[in-house]
Amino acid sequence: MRSRIAIPILGLVILFSACMAEGDYLLYKDPRKPLNIRIRDLMSRMTLAEKIGQMTQLDRRILTPKIMKDYGIGSVLSGGGSVPKPEATAREWVDMVNEFQKGALSTRLGIPMIYGIDAVHGHNNVYKATVFPHNVGLGATRDPELVKRIGAATALEVRATGIQYVFAPCIAVCRDPRWGRCYESYSEDPEIVKQMTEIIPGLQGDHPPRKAGIPYVAGKEKVAACAKHFVGDGGTTKGINENNTVTDWHTLLSIHMPGYYQSIIKGVSTVMVSYSSWNGVKMHAHHNLVTNFLKDTLKFRGFVISDWQGIDKITSPPHANYTHSVLTGVQAGIDMIMVPLNHTEFIDILTSLVNNNYIPLCRIDDAVRRILRVKFTMGLFENPLADYRLVKHLGSQAHRDLAREAVRKSLVLLKNGANADEPVLPLPKKATRILVAGSHANNLGYQCGGWTITWQGVEGNNVTLGTTILDAVTATVDPSTEVVYSENPTTEFMESNKFSYAIVVVGELPYAETAGDNLNLTIPEQGITTMNNVCGSIKCVVVLISGRPLVVQPHLSNIDSLVAAWLPGTQGQGVADVLFGDYEFTGKLSRTWFKTVDQLPMNVVLLTKGICVQKNKISKEGFVRHTRSIIGDQMLKMAVYKFQSQASRNSLSVPSQFPQSAASQQQHSQMPTDDSSNMAIESNAQKLRENE
């Protein structure tokens, strides 16, 4: 009897278990299902509160796993200097990110969060990470393949700390070096900026064929990228940060937009909106550009994110009418709002605006659909937690070697001796006694610039792991050469000592954003004093550490050789590699080098094979005369010439294949009048529509 009863009972148990398994099945968690079906299924299950949670991004400083769970927060960020603890290890970063992720996964639907950070020249917030040259230096390399490799290395180091999303690249076209963010720009030339978007497949992985415009991240060693700051942030009046860009539509398209449609074609996951305005309208409030153009015309399929408290600045003063700011920003088309410190106010106001029909639910759904598209594409639902096996890649020797390569390729030779027959560079490694001087020769923080460990950057050699230029010189010269270091030698010191030659390293102090706005663009006084004291006494090479061209004309006659090293990052050995001739100077200016700030803004037209292409089509010889009239004979070398190969070091000539670079243009209105840029955008937009 017992055995006869057992069989039906067993069948019921099996049937019940099958039903339970069927009930536990969640379509959106099935990686075998098509992307759009997974998104649709998940959104059908979400409440308004859960959707608004996905649109909210908080800074880690105010966050706990409980807040993650209670509000269903969709994203977390580390602002500049926001770290688990000073000098935190990669493993400690992973521990923190995973704890936040566990909070997100404990919510009703288990939607993973995405963690973002400003990795703008390597994983620059993290101690012992590889810090690459800032973008102004990478632009001087003219090497998209190098930039792609840097993107891949950066992605791996970011993933080594558990983070999956970077607020990079900055594809601003800096038209005025007085702007404090000019070093974040590859060039004033939109063509160079467009070429450097090759960093995106480095960060995210190579985009699959026939999928142009669709966000793509290739696995656990890649990160979601962010093209920023949309749009025109590099064209503000007098270079004032967060100010107004006054241009016509054609200029906006031809100068500031090309990098964006190129980024979209390469599958960039997100776009960050600029603090700046275009013709008086704040970009965070610009529905026509964010929704109608970026999303609808260019068919951008990822999500649009605000900048740090960006919607607050829609009003003046900021946060004066926050309800208006939330309404305007979300309606403009911003999908994820960076509200780092006031999430409850934002969530309450946005909820009220939707419930009272000021913001339609379809706008919320559009935002959430875009955010989920990126998260699904990244594989976060399948692999939400960080992989501890990647921690070994932070600051790896392979990445430091790559950064060293980038440094030497970014150096631009501006002057080399009184004439071509008497070059000073390369320097001899074997000498009796040499002097290394200047505020930036033995200061890793100055060498790296802003956005290094902290937002504004720091000074000193304990900032992170790296090689100063002084250390690099000492390691490069012959063991018999005595290297003397004096940060600020006096004239008395110079008179009482004999040196074979001197290397003077001076430049700007670290800064970021508005703190770097500068109407004078002069070398700091301490640096000028050092140059005068040293270069007036002996043969000297000046290495300029700066995020932009500075006024050097008054000092040129006193300097034997001048090298623009930009902001090279942690691997100072790359500077010595070139100064002493182990590698050639190959960098080329990606910015016009002005004589005085009165000439600004002064911008590129087009230079191909040494010939200036302007409306009047002046000849190569005409370009030389034109350049000389603006910046003088000494500065002509800065705009046109490069250091030649080993066989021809004793002569300088116009390069046969000079990429698009510097000729001057006094006003923004003097742009090409043809419609080629507009046609290119429309052509690419059509490609995106075809792949929709």
Image (cartoon, rainbow, N blue to C red):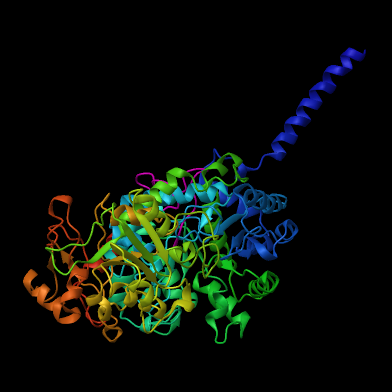
Magenta: main secondary structure equals loop
For this rendering, which residue is in front, 69 or 212?
69
Q: Residue at x 55, y 67 (%)?
A: 363
Across and down, in percent, residue 504 comes to 35, 67
Q: Magenta includes 343?
A: no
Quadrant in which residue 391 is drawn: top right
Quadrant in which residue 47 is drawn: bottom right
| 578 is higher (above) or lower (below) than 343 | above
Across and down, in percent, residue 601 comes to 29, 81
Q: Is residue 51 left or right of residue 160?
A: right
Q: Quadrant of the N terminus?
A: top right
Residue sitting at the far right:
1
Is residue 682 visible in the rendered structure shown here?
no
Count the marks: how many? 0
Q: Is residue 389 left or right of residue 66?
A: left
Q: Residue at x 75, y 35 (%)?
A: 20
Residue sitting at the far front:
496
For this rendering, which residue is in front, 388 or 107?
388
Give the residues in magenta: 204-227
Across and down, in percent, residue 403 comes to 40, 52
For this rendering, which residue is in front, 612 or 633?
633
Q: Residue at x 61, y 56 (%)?
A: 87
Is residue 663 visible in the rendered structure shown here?
yes
